[in-house]
Amino acid sequence: MEVMTKEQVEKQIEELTAQLTGDMFKDMDIKDQIHNLKMKANGVKPMDSSFECVGCGS
């Protein structure tokens, strides 16, 4: 697994945010990626889980 710096994560979030269209269905995957990146940046991931978002149910 690649370890990203906080700056790299923030840059990727900005790039993904720029791709949002306003269409909920088209944006769903992008918003999911943004959510996962924000969780990684903030260290909010279940410690014993390989799943990205099992803690919050997304």
Image (spheres, rainbow, N blue to C red):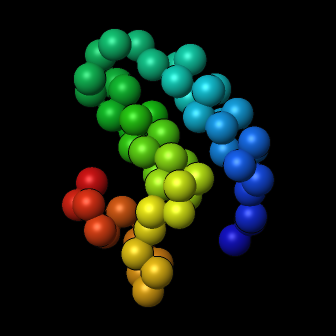
Q: Can the viewer see residue 40?
A: yes
Residue 12 picture quarter: top right
Residue 52 vs 10, above or below: the answer is: below
Residue 20: x and y, percent?
Answer: 45, 19
Image x and y of residue 46, in percent: 40, 75
Query: x and y percent of residue 28 in the render?
Result: 33, 34
Query: Residue 2 appears in which quarter of the rendering?
Result: bottom right
Where is the N terminus found, in terms of image quarters? bottom right
Q: Tell which residue pokes out farthest to the left in this image.
A: 57
Spot the residue most to the front.
42
Taking the spot 67% from the left edge, 45% from the top edge, the residue there is 9
Is 37 positioned to the left or the right of 51 in the image? right
Q: Can the viewer see residue 33 in this picture?
A: no
| Residue depicted at x 23% and y 61% | 57
x, y percent for residue 41: 58, 53
Seen at 71% across and 49% down, the residue is: 6
Residue 26 versus residue 23 in the image, above or below? below
Q: How many callouts does the rendering have?
A: 0
Q: Residue furthest bottom?
A: 48
* Up-down relation of residue 45 to residue 39 (above or below): below
Q: Nearer the viewer, residue 31 or 47?
A: 47
Quarter of the figure that contains the C terminus: bottom left
Occupied quadrant, residue 11? top right
Give the residue displayed 75% in from the left and 42% down from the top.
7
